[in-house]
Image (cartoon, helix red, strand yellow):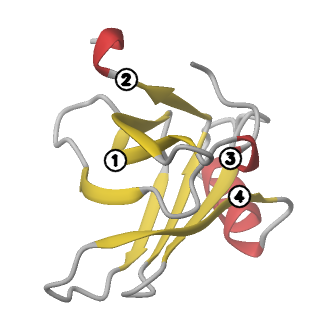
Amino acid sequence: MRVNSLTELNLHDSELIDFVMPVDDSSEVVIHLDYIDDYQTLRTAKRSLVFSGCVKVVIDANLLVTPDSLRTGHELKNSSMLSEVKEKLTKSGFPAPDELKHFYLETNSNASIFNVIAESVDLRGPEDG
């Protein structure tokens, strides 16, 4: 499911399982979650946030031996990091896509921060392959 805004998702308190940065040419970053499908029943399901068209990922991870969940996730409009990435792409001769967005996620217990500059994000379940 294509996501227009991270704020439309039930990210708060969804448990972080892991994150994957493939070393191939896919330019995707994947965060696996035990996603809260319904806050009323607290029913969860294994889902993945898939960031596509990634050009920059900065992770400030506090690695403790405790399970963690997401505290917040949203898009930062007109951030300095996004502006810097677009400027560097332009200077390098690559057109900076207007679709680039700055996605920000923070965890609860460990206060880890994920900054992802990418074109889009999808929420996928096992049925999506």
Q: At numbered mark 4, what does the secondary structure look like: helix, strand or loop?
A: strand
The CA distance from mark 3 to mark 4 is 5 Å
Q: Left or right: 48 with respect to 121?
A: left
- According to the picture, the residue beneath numbered tag 2 turns out to be 125
Amino acid type at circle 2 is Gly
Q: Give residue 25's mark.
A: none
Q: Kindly identify the amino acid type of the residue bearing the numbered disc 4.
A: His
The residues bearing labels 2 and 1 have C-alpha atoms spaced at a distance of 10 Å
- Disc on the earlier residue, 4 or 1: 1
Sequence-first disc among 3 and 1:
3
| Crowd class of label 4 (few under 14; some 14 to 19; many from 20; radius 10 Å) | some
> Helix or strand or loop: what does disc 3 sit on?
helix
Q: Is residue 103 left or right of residue 64?
A: right
Q: Which type of secondary structure does the marked residue at label 2 adopt?
A: loop
Marks 2 and 4 sit apart, C-alpha to C-alpha, by 20 Å
Quadrant of the frame with the N terminus: top right
Q: Which mark is residue 6?
A: 3
Around disc 1, counting alpha carbons within 10 Å, would you say few (fewer than 14), some (14 to 19), or many (20 or more)? some
Q: Position of residue 26 (x, y in %)?
A: 30, 28
Q: Is disc 3 in contact with disc 1, using a CB cutoff of under 8 Å?
A: no
Q: Earlier in the sequence, mark 2 or mark 1?
A: 1
Q: Which circle's residue, 3 or 4, is located before the other in the chain?
A: 3
Q: Compared with residue 127, is residue 83 higher up or lower down, i.e. above or below?
A: below
In the picture, the disc for residue 74 is 4
Which quadrant is home to the C terminus? top left
**Residue farthest toward the right in the current orientation of the protein:** 78
Residue where numbered disc 1 is placed: 34
Residue 8 picture location, percent across and down: 74, 41
For the residues bearing labels 3 and 4, Cβ distance under 8 angstroms? yes
